[in-house]
Image (cartoon, rainbow, N blue to C red):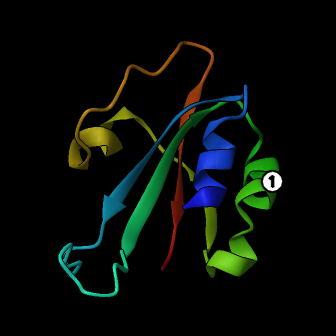
Amino acid sequence: MARLRDVAARDEVEWVRVALHDDTQLDDADGDVIAESVLFATTLPATELEEAVDIAWLHSDGVVESDESSLEDYTEVPAVPGHHRVVSLVWD
């Protein structure tokens, strides 16, 4: 989670939102959380964002372009500024 906080603090990132996997139990004793995907409102190129979050360490398939319709599964999503775009960090 610290890695995502660091990325969220960058000037090129407006916000970050995490969608939980349907099988996630939030009351697990070990505190593990399984993410389905992570959305970013950003101006960073995909390759820079992938490097910043370290997709290899996360075993992610990378960043894919998204659109505002992908926000439907998230709560409390701020507006997407005009110069930012929505991208998803995904696992297949």
Give me the residue at 74% from left, 37% from top.
44
Is 29 on the left or on the right of 10, as rendered? left
- Which residue is label 1 attached to? 47
Give the percent coordinates (x, y) of residue 72. 23, 42
Is 32 on the left or on the right of 24, as rendered? right
Element type at marker 1? helix
Give the percent coordinates (x, y) of residue 46. 73, 49
Is 56 on the left or on the right of 87, as rendered? right
Question: 7 above or below 32?
Answer: above
Q: Amino acid at mark 1?
A: Thr
What number of labels is visible?
Answer: 1
Give me the residue at 77% from left, 41% from top.
45
Question: 20 above or below 74?
Answer: below
Give me the residue at 50% from left, 75% from top.
91
Tell which of 70 and 48 is nearer to you. 48
* Residue 60 falls in image quadrant: bottom right
Give the percent coordinates (x, y) of residue 47. 80, 53
Quarter that holds the N terminus: bottom right
Give the percent coordinates (x, y) of residue 63. 62, 58
Is 48 on the left or on the right of 14, as rendered? right
Query: Residue extending furthest front?
Result: 29
Query: Residue extending furthest top?
Result: 82
Question: 12 above or below 46?
Answer: above
Decide: few, some or many residues near mark 1? Use Cα within 10 Å; few <14, some 14-19, many ≥20: few
Give me the residue at 61% from left, 40% from top.
8
